[in-house]
Amino acid sequence: MLFAGSDRDGVEAGKITAAYRRWAEPRVVEGRIYRTNAGRIEIDSVRQVNPDLISDYDDDIFAADRQNARDVRRRLRGNDDWPTFLIKFHLVEGPDPREELAATAELTPEDLEDLRTRLAQLDSLSRHGAWTTATLRKIEEKPTVRAADLAADLGRDTPTFKLDVRKLKNLGLTYSLETGYELSPRGAAYLKSL
């Protein structure tokens, strides 16, 4: 989830704890932690609501930092036919474990073996063959290049390429940038070990 302007500041400060979104289907899952542009949030609940039945006195309006029900409806984006969801969440304090992992440049033999095993599993489960090392090398070769361009270089479609890079990020091997990606210290150390 992304938050714009004062919403981002409110989420970051822990003052905003709800959001209304119009999506074709829910994009978040209750109980999961998500990284956002306002920090990490944990989803407390996700439920579909009828925007026409939102009351001006609903506490969720204030938790979303909206003036009234009309303000909620006015700010909804997306296709009018899509359902509206009310997402309740709270800010997760403390460092992101993935960032701490990614910043680790010294890999023990056990770390390397664990990474090799995990990456081999990702390769074996893939419908498009082994991809992990080629993707890491492409990101090393072309940091800050758009995902669509990297995907094209590898003969991949952009959506599944992005999903795969997210898997590498979850292992602490890459960073997502405003445009494109770069290897983390952990990712660079892993490639150097090959």
Image (tube, rainbow, N blue to C red):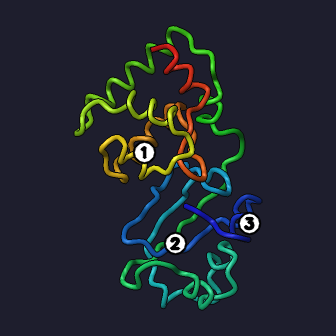
Does label 3 or label 1 sit earlier along the sequence? 3
- Name the foreground residue: 17 vs 130: 130
Q: CA distance from mark 3 to mark 1?
A: 35 Å
* Residue 29: image tag: none
**Residue 121, percent across and down?**
32, 26
Circle 2 — which element?
strand
Residue annotated with mark 1 = 150
| Residue plotted at (67% across, 52% down) | 39
**Residue 142, percent across and down?**
51, 39
Q: CA distance from mark 2 to mark 3?
A: 17 Å
User: As shown in the figure, which amino acid type bears the numbered disc 2?
Assistant: Leu
Residue annotated with mark 2 = 86
Residue annotated with mark 3 = 10
**Quadrant for the C terminus in the image:** top left
- Classed neighbour count for the residue bearing mark 2: other residues with Cα under 10 Å, few (<14), some (14–19), many (≥20): many
Q: CA distance from mark 2 to mark 1?
A: 35 Å
